[in-house]
Image (tube, rainbow, N blue to C red):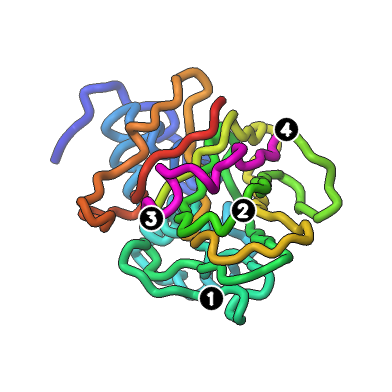
Amino acid sequence: MLVSTLKQSRIFELPFEIIVLIVSTFSEYDMKNFSMTCHNFRQLSFDQELWKAMYETRFTTDKDTVIKYSANSLWKQNYLKKATLRLSAVDDMEISHMNTEYWETEETESSIYGHVAKLNLVCWFKMIGNLESVPPGEYKVQWRMRVVSNSGWTDSFKFRVSLKEIYDNDPITDDTHCMPFEFYENPTIVGCGWIVITLPGRFVINKKLGFSKVYFSHDDITSPWKYDLQEFDWVRLIPISPTAKYDDSKLYVKIDNYNRMVFVKDDSILGNIYKFQD
């Protein structure tokens, strides 16, 4: 058995129930930093009771899951799966007129989820969704999509992210971004496979707010019809350091010549890089 060469922290003099109570407010990032401080903390980070307490604190609205996994020894895995900061367009978002002649679900191996949302024809274009219990911090917002044709479209869709529910008549804020001019006429984008759009700036959740719900919207409800424009896979948040420079190269995995995935892990992304100008 390994023995820490460091003097044992006084935290281990506390009753285990108190340690669980302290750690229950941690995020997965806090736990990672906690486990790197010494061998004893690293061993403690594998304790399933701690991950169970973290799960119940962060996802208190998910009572059925808590009951279901009450005797489960895989609390860490359950927590990390639930804490994934990504929404499937098909599974997790609300799309106006989905699964009608206007929008359809398209099965594909090019998505981690196995299917994407395909736009056929629509006037009222609106996608909304939310992530529950996002830890405080700074984030980049990314959308994975594929532009299949321009269909003569030259207008601009809006991307919005907010800590408040987004309504159609809400004023434009700093966290609202529009597609660059002539995006749908760019020959390096139209018909060139999946792209991952990284929105400019940083989305910040203040520490005082604690775990927060984050709302996403991608919309254009103007009168012109939009048809055969694009397909959507997911939207996600990328945690970033408040001081380190954002680096695209750390966020992408390789694809083969046929734009298919060659390696997939729990939170990989596939496609070409397209970043709005900061």
Magenta run includes residue 185:
yes
What residue sits right under mark 4 in the picture? 174
- Give the mark nearer the N terminus: 1 vs 3: 3
Using the numbered discs, state the Cα–Cα distance from disc 4 to disc 2 in whole angstroms.
Answer: 25 Å
What secondary structure is found at the residue carrying circle 3? helix
Label 4 environment density (alpha carbons within 10 Å; few <14, some 14–19, many ≥20): few
Residue 34, located in which quarter of the rendered image?
Answer: top left
Magenta highlight: main SS: loop
Using the numbered discs, state the Cα–Cα distance from disc 1 to disc 3 in whole angstroms.
Answer: 35 Å
What residue sits right under mark 3 in the picture? 76
Q: Quadrant of the N terminus?
A: top left
What secondary structure is found at the residue carrying circle 4? loop
- Give the mark nearer the N terminus: 1 vs 2: 1
Q: Amino acid at mark 1?
A: Glu
Q: Range of the magenta residues? A: 175-193
Q: Amino acid at mark 2?
A: Trp
Asked if residue 24 shows in the view, the reply is no
Asked if residue 124 shows in the view, the reply is yes
What residue sits right under mark 1 in the picture? 104
Using the numbered discs, state the Cα–Cα distance from disc 2 to disc 3 in whole angstroms.
Answer: 46 Å
Camera-side residue: 1 or 65? 65
Q: Is residue 238 left or right of residue 39?
A: right
Residue 125, located in which quarter of the rendered image?
Answer: bottom right
Percent position of residue 262, x then y: 21, 54
Q: Residue at x 60, y 69 (%)?
A: 63
Residue 245, compared with residue 4, is above or below; it is: above
What residue sits right under mark 2 in the picture? 153
What secondary structure is found at the residue carrying circle 1? strand
Percent position of residue 220, x then y: 71, 55
- Give the mark nearer the N terminus: 4 vs 3: 3
Q: Is residue 153 left or right of residue 235?
A: right
Q: Residue furthest left?
A: 1
